[in-house]
Structure formats: C-alpha cells, structure tokens
Amino acid sequence: MTTHDRKALPDGSFPGPNAPRRTWLLILAAFVVGLLIMAGVGAVLVSIQGHKAEQTQYPLRVVQIAPTELDPAVWGKNFPHEYDTFLQMKDDTLKTPYGGSVPFSKLERDPAMKTIWAGYAFSVDYNQPRGHYYALVDQKKTKRQEFANQPGACANCHAAEAPQMIQQMGWENFNHTPYKEISGTLHIGTSCADCHDPNTMELRITRPAFVNAMAARGIDLSKATRQEMRTYVCAQCHVEYYFKGDNKVLTFPWDNGLKVEDIIAYYDKIGFKDWTHGVTGAPMLKAQHPDFEMWSSSIHARSGVTCADCHMPYIREGAVKVSDHWLRSPLANINRACQPCHNESEQELHDRVVAIQDTTMELLKRSETGLLAAIDAINAAKTAGASDADLNEARQLQRNASFRWDFVSSANSTGFHSPQESARILATAIDYARQSQLAAVKVTPKSAAQK
C-alpha cells in the first residue's frame, strides 16, 4: 500500500503502518481507566452506605426508653456495645504513673496537702477517684460529708437523679437542701441519660450550671456542633465551681474568662472564700477539678480534639463503629486514643506523656515547698504578735499561690491537658508563695525574728 492509497491526516501527513495498533491501545487504556474510575465511585458509595448503616445500627429497639429512665442496664438493651464497655468502668485496678482507677489516699501519698488545706474538709479526706461507675458510691463514703454539712448541689454531678430532682424541687431549692437529706433518694451514679436524649441519642446538656455559665459567656449551646458537644457534655462537671450565696447555688466562675487569673479576679471582686486557713487565717480558695478550663488552653483544643476523642475513642465491634464508653486514661488505650492522630509507637507516646507529667509533678512539689514555707512564716509572724493588718499582704499572696497550685493539682491528667499552661501556672504559684513568705518575715517583730 502506497501513500497514494492512504487518506491524508488533517496536517497533510500520512498515518504510519502501526497507526491501527496504537488506536486500539488507546481505546484499551481508556477502557481500563474507566473501570478504575467506576471501581473508585463504587467504593465511595459502599463507604457512604456503610456509614449510613452505622448511624442506624439499631433500627429495631428492643425496649422503648422512657424520658425518665436512668438505669444504664435498660439503655443497654438497645445499645449493648456501649453498655458492655460502660460496665468495664467497674475495673478499679488500672494503674498509671500518676493516676488510674486504684483508690488510694492522696493525703497519705502527699502529707503536705493536709497543711495546705488546714481547716478545710479536704484535709480530712481526699482520695483518688475510681471513675464514673463509682461516682455516687465514693461520694457517699467520703468523710468530707461528716466534716462539713455539704449542700445538695454536691449531688449535681454524682447522681443521675439530679436533673429530675432539679425539675421537681426547683434549681435553688435543690442546691441549698442539705446533701444528707436527699442522699437516701440517690441510687445511680453516671447514667446514659446524663449525656444522651433517650429518643434520638443525640448528645445533650442536662446540668443547669453549665447552661447558665455558657449563656453568661454569650455561647448559645443550641448552636453547638456535635464535635463541640463531645466536650461540652463532659464540661458539665469537670470544671471549677463554687456555691453562690446563702442558697449555695452551683456556679461556674467564668464571667472574666477561663484562665486561673480570670477566675481569681472573679472571686476577689465578689469577696468570696471557701474557708479560712486553720493555721494562717488567710481567706482561701479551693479548686475543684478544672479539666475543661485547662483543656481550653491546650493544643488539642485549638486543633478541635475533644474529651471524647481521647477518653472515648471509636472502636469496632464487627461491622459496627461505636464510642468506647469505658472512660479511662488514654495511657491505658494508646492504640485507639492517640495513634489515630500521632504516627509514633505506643512506647514513644507513653514516654512523652509521662515526661510531661514528671515535669508537672516536680513543679507541684516545688510549689508545695514554697507554700509550706509561707504558712510557717505567717504563723511565726502571727505568733510573734503581728496584727491582721500586718499579715494581710502575706495572706493574700498565700491565697493566690495556693489556688494556682490547686488549679493544677486538682485537675486530672497531672498537667497533660495543657502542659505549657500548667507550667506557667505553677511558676507563678512558686513566685507568689515565696512573696508570701517574704511578706510575713518582713512584718515579724524583730525580737521574734532574731530568735
């Protein structure tokens, strides 16, 4: 076949003898690419359907959950995977370097706390909590109930019955009723109803104090995303709080912000104190468990990581993906809690956490040493005849130092929730403690100081 027999191409040239072969190769390649695209689209559709199936993994309810149902066992009939992991919180043998679920006396481990909290209920009894399963059991057993006539507000986070009692009694009446008067009606600690709507299983807020505090900060909880709610449901209880006024209304001191300085400024403005120190006479503040406040300043918070992401990571039960309801330290579950985001070995991640906690604990001990020295100095000045006016500065500095130390000490995680903020707070705690000591020495009568 000559060029005269072949049809010219648009550019005037003639196709070579291998042109038909190249054409078929192009057609074959296009066919293969098409198959790959179709396979990819199919995989995406399968994935979407799988996620939809996860969202409706319990289309047939075994029981109808009543709006007033609090017993987790009843909810567990519809949600067996979540309930099975929830029951694992009975385990009180879990140990981590600075925590876990094994109960022990923190006062025996750290006797300095007795002096720092002298005259307050926490100097009598302060134990490592065993976890959510024992929230009510351990509260009923604490000796702090005997030391102080605690208000009903204490049941807010320790009893599943609290929201219903608040609805029946009214918010303020519930708060100021003595705890011992209502404790006999409390039988369930943490419940599914604390965080979930029984009809839709959507996350919800059930504690008024958190709603009130967030509203005061201009935050509309009705607009919260599901990811935000995975922190907010925890922040109902894992926070700093106080009992406001004669009615002992549970209140979160967040009007100025969530930093420790903001909270102290709030307390100073209203002239609040938790107790008068038994040795120095200083007007003291007791931090509770400001986990939400500490987390809020962390890199995890800025990255959109929630409480549930680390403490309730997703697990697979067959084809079903659920949140692990065994709330515990991520150190006991590094594979699921940490490695989905951090591409390092379990040992490396474990060592990082413990290194942060070791540093925090060292700073806590230095803070305690400073506080004990300040308490001794104020007591010496008082014994030597220094007046209340003379000691006012030293006592205020003690108050500032003690609350900062307590803010880190009483929060869970031994500093890990916000390492840099923990270090900053403890650095200022040490500074205030030493300033308090010097202020006390300065007003100590010379004759006593020379002895």
Image (cartoon, grey):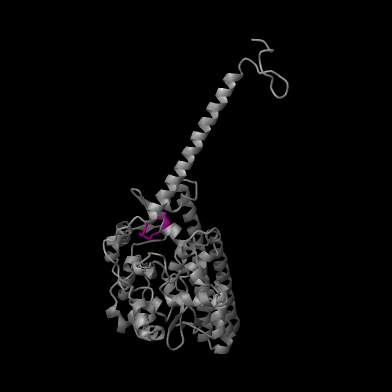
Q: Relative to residue 417, is residue 323 drawn left or right?
A: left
Query: Could you say where residue 383 lies in the image, as x and y percent from the top left?
Result: 50, 86
Q: Which residues are magenta?
A: 324-331
- Name the residue located 59 percent from the left edge and 21 percent from the top edge: 22
* Quadrant of res 310: bottom left
- Name the residue located 58 percent from the left edge and 19 percent from the top edge: 20
Query: Could you say where residue 164 lies in the image, as x and y percent from the top left?
Result: 34, 78
Q: Is residue 327 magenta?
A: yes
What count of labels does the image hold?
Answer: 0
* Quadrant of res 288: bottom left
Q: Is residue 255 magenta?
A: no
Q: From the viewer's side, name the closer residue of 339 and 70.
A: 70
Q: From the viewer's side, name the closer residue of 91 and 377.
A: 91
Residue at the top extreme of this rendering: 1
Q: Quadrant of the N terminus?
A: top right
Could you tell me what secondary structure mostly forms the magenta stretch? Answer: loop
| Residue 134 seen in the current view | yes
Query: Could you say where residue 401 lies in the image, as x and y percent from the top left?
Result: 54, 74
* Quadrant of res 230: bottom left
Q: From the viewer's side, name the closer residue of 45 and 155.
A: 45
| Residue 387 seen in the current view | no
Above or below for 29 versus 47? above
Query: Could you say where residue 180 lies in the image, as x and y percent from the top left?
Result: 31, 83
Q: Quadrant of the C terminus?
A: bottom right
Above or below for 290 versus 38? below
